[in-house]
Image (cartoon, rainbow, N blue to C red):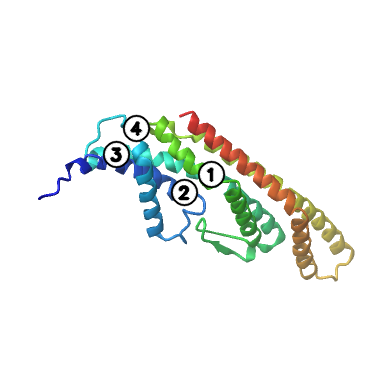
Amino acid sequence: MSLNLEPILAHAPAFILVLTRLSGLLLFIPLLSASMVPTQVKVMLTLALGAAVYPAVGPPAVPLSADLYDLAPLMGGEILIGASIGILATVPLVTAQLAGLIMGQQMGLGLAQVFNPSVDIEGDNIGQILFFAAMSAFLVAGGLEMLYQSLVHTFSIVPLGAFRARSAPLELLTGLVGAGFSVALRVSMPVLLILALENLATGFISKTVPSLNIMVFGFPVRVLLGLVIVMLGVGAMLGALMSGITEDMARIESWVWSL
């Protein structure tokens, strides 16, 4: 007896679009999008989530064909939905690393660059510490669960094949990036202010004691002073970053509900 695959193949185009929307999120979602997560794990996770979500997905907005040329434009719109949510969620974490980078550069720690496998870029030690602190706050706040719930909710709001590039949250992304720069400056401002005063004091010392090697004297003082300020203000820094993460998640949910 031959196996009839036609009923199964009839669901293939819609299932591919579901997987595409989910894979868009996995390309940019914090933690799971890191290169240190094996590709096999990402693929299996996408397939498992797709199998769980597909039975509840409504009918597509347009007739679907098994032809790849017909599916490609629709897949572009689907991947844009997941990618938009993932990119928006990444902004606060990059903000934390930017704040650490600003402080590290002013403290003189920019000479010691380290690789961050979570976002595939290099950064300094302070930026790494703040990045992983923000990542921990994101996980504690239920960020991963919220992102998946938001993406799953989009299936009930935006039918398969109905999303267009003009609906991408460019305004929201621009606003989040601008707010991220503001948060990064607020977080790093205490260190910048203290180091500016240290620069002023070092300038006076170099004028009054010309024989003193100010480079040898000033560099370790600058690093130690910056580290002390970071340790004293780590609570306030984490509070500001946590506030930015919760606001970002609220904005993502608001955008999803407005689709």
Which residue type carries mark 4? Gly
- Dot 3: few (<14), some (14–19), or many (≥20) neighbours within 10 Å? many
In the shown orientation, is residue 245 left or right of residue 158? right
Determine the CA span between mark 1 and mark 3.
27 Å
Q: Upstream in the sequence, badge 3 or badge 4? A: 3
Asked whether disc 1 touches disc 3, contact meaning CB atoms under 8 Å apart, the reply is no
The residue where tag 4 is placed is 58
Determine the CA span between mark 2 and mark 1.
8 Å
- Dot 4: few (<14), some (14–19), or many (≥20) neighbours within 10 Å? some
Which residue type carries mark 1? Ala
Q: Is residue 156 above or below residue 50?
A: above
The residue where tag 2 is placed is 28
| Quarter of the figure with residue 101 | bottom right
State the mark number for residue 14: 3
Determine the CA span between mark 4 and mark 1.
26 Å
Q: Circle 3 — which element?
A: helix
State the mark number for residue 89: 1
Asked whether disc 2 touches disc 1, contact meaning CB atoms under 8 Å apart, the reply is yes
